[in-house]
Image (cartoon, grey):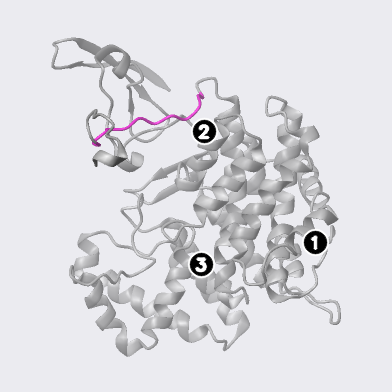
Amino acid sequence: MGERRYSVVEAGSGAALELRERSGTAGPNVLEISQLYRNQGVFTYDPGFGATASCSSTITYIDGEQGILHYRGYPIEQLAEQSTFIEVAYLLLYGELPNPDELAEFDLAIRTHTMLNESFLRFFNGFHHDAHPMAMVSGVVACMSAFYHDSMNIQNARHRDIFAHRIIAKIPTIAAAAYKHSLGQPFVYPKNKLDYCSNLLHMFFSVPPAPYEIDPVAAQALDLLFILHADHEQNCSTSTVRFAGSSGTNPYSAISAGISALWGPAHGGANEAVINMLEEIGDRSRIRDYVDRAKDRNDPFRLMGFGHRVYKNYDPRAAIIRRMCHRLLEKLGASQDGPLFELALELEQIALKDEYFIEKNLYPNVDFYSGIIYRALGIPKSMFTVMFAIARTVGWVAHWREMVRDPESRIGRPRQLYIGPAQRDYVPVDRR
């Protein structure tokens, strides 16, 4: 970490302000502008905050030009190949990989917090059968604050740990209950003997009348997806959690806000849009027509799953998921998603060789393949974003914990460039 004086900025009045340049361990340096308005009476203007660092963080690093993603310094490729989601969750929460005893203790804490209060299950009966699962999950998570108010002191380190374990453990159970409610099937209780992803598959797909055997390859595929989706720096939903949490609200409300932000089609709903696009294309013979449409400025059609707000190179997560797609579909044999996957592969190859996509750095991203894996596992499109939320909850909690302990943290309060009417006088209704 470094800090030095950077430059002098002169306003129209001739007043000057010396800005500080601050550097981190990786990535671009930043200019400290918090005194700009106080000293010179001007704001910065950055719609979408694409060039603004809202906080300092030790959790995740992304280099979009080089296609790099690190969790706490560890390359995502190494974690995807050698780690597990629970171990990655510990890493994101506590900053270091756990030793065997720490991992066993953390894993046990998660396994033994998976049950829901029965009143929670009755909440689901208040939703119509065709309610979107994200609406149910967001609402139920927000309601958790009504049940656990005795351990929500955000300044208490022990309470923060209890919250972290509780929400990470219960979010799959909540998601499974939402899915079962949409089917009209009975809720399935978790089993402490099962690992995180096997337990989720058990709660999703088992039914009382028949035995259910968990496919280990399916559980591994889900575990991999959760690792890849666990965190992604200051994205929309993570920033929403930090923003909501900056007010001092209870952590369940902050996570619920993040779930709602993730629901947007430009964020967590992109993998569902990829499946819809592939189904619309339908046949390999039509791929070229759709590629040409994507290049036509007068056509609103877009190739979903290509390009990324941050990555200007190949999304490192996409290459990892692509290999898992092959492995999973080979294991499952001929399935309804085999042709869809082949369609995706050919679309990818055509786009990667097209000068238009090369020039604009439109490479496949993580959403391009994740929906195919979810479909192969039997998870419906309406649940895709919920699956994303389960994984991303770990990252949200890690960022919330970091925000609470950050001495520089303040309540979020962006400013604006006002372009509305100048002051005007009220006119009585009978004179308008």
Q: Is residue 309 above or below residue 158?
A: below
Q: Are marks 3 and 2 in contact (CB under 8 Å)?
A: no
**Residue beneath the point at 33% across and 63% down:** 363
Span colored in magenta: 409-420
On the question of residue 326 being in view, the answer is: yes
Which amino acid lies under the numbered mark 1 shown in the image of this protein? Leu
Determine crowd level at label 2: few under 14, some 14-19, many 20+ residues with C-alpha closer than 10 A. some
- Answer whether residue 84 is visible to the viewer in this image: no
Q: Quadrant of the N terminus?
A: top left
Q: Amino acid at mark 3?
A: Ser
Task: Residue under label 3, please give it.
Answer: 370
- Tell me the CA gap for discs 1 and 3: 23 Å
Which one is in front, 149 or 426?
426
Residue at 59% in and 67% down: 383
* Left or right of 9 in this view: 408: right
User: Which label was assigned to residue 194?
Assistant: 1
